[in-house]
Image (cartoon, rainbow, N blue to C red):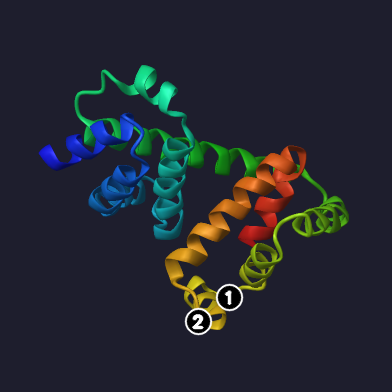
Amino acid sequence: MFKTQKYWTLFLRGDDRALGDLYHVLFEPLVFVAFHRVKNMEVARDIVSELFVTLLATSTELRKTKWQNVESIQAYLTTSVKHKAIDFIRAEKSHFDILAQLPEKQLMENNDDVLDGLHALASKETELFQLHLDGYSNMEIAKQNMISEKTVRNKLSMTRQKMALMYKSLLTIALWMIVH
């Protein structure tokens, strides 16, 4: 408990390495919280990783004003993970409802647009994402590219975030491709 607050205080002061330490201490407990909601370990890990990426992307000035009064960082992050998991479930349900209404022909026509957008990403990210779309597991992708499975998860997560930003209107199609 004391260790996490110490790391949090250092992070608020601008020490990004302290967030890495906090990540190592809290990652597994937070993944457990997310998994309890989403029932998918890979998605749970993505949710927690995305939360830490968001924290890291926050400027030092905003950190101080936004989070200076947080008394228990573990409680705050646990609540944040719960909310992100619920948001994921809502979005997933919403996207599947929309997909059910789209004709198959429209999905296939937009497939090329999404793949074209992948070319705008870094070639390594595109390669990893294409392997994921082809049905390879994260472990298989990691072995094939001689990187860790955690790196694969993080790169796939970051690729999904970039795609969401680039193609908000095509996000439903991309999710369909990921699921199928």
Element assignment for label 2: helix
x, y percent for residue 123: 71, 65
1 or 2: tag closer to the N-terminus: 1
Q: Residue furthest front?
A: 14
Q: CA distance from mark 1 to mark 2?
A: 11 Å
- Left/right placement of residue 162 relative to residue 87 reads right
- Residues at badges 1 and 2 in contact (C-beta under 8 Å)? no
Image vertical order of residue 149 relative to residue 93, above or below? below
Q: Where residue 70 appears, x then y in whole percent?
A: 25, 23
Can residue 1 be seen here? The reply is no
Residue 108: quadrant of the picture: bottom right
Which residue is under mark 1?
136
Relative to 152, residue 56 above or below: above
Disc on res. 87: none
Circle 1 residues within 10 Å: few <14, some 14–19, many ≥20: some
Identify the disc placed on residue 143. Answer: 2
Residue 106 appears left or right of 41? right
Position of the C terminus, as image quadrant, is bottom right
Q: Amino acid at mark 2?
A: Lys
Q: Residue at x 42, y 36 (%)?
A: 55
Q: Secondary structure at mark 1?
A: loop
The reply, left or right, for residue 94 in relation to residue 137 is: right
153 on left or right of 8 = right
> In the image, what residue occupies the spot 46% across and 29% down?
59
Q: Residue at x 54, y 54 (%)?
A: 157
Amino acid type, label 1: Tyr
Towards the viewer: 78 or 73: 73
User: How dense is the environment of label 2, judged by Cα within 10 Å: few (below 14), some, or many (20 and up)?
Assistant: few
Viewer-proximal residue among 138 and 88: 138
Q: 8 or 36: nearer the eye?
A: 8
Instruction: Locate residue 60, reporting x and y percent.
Output: 41, 28
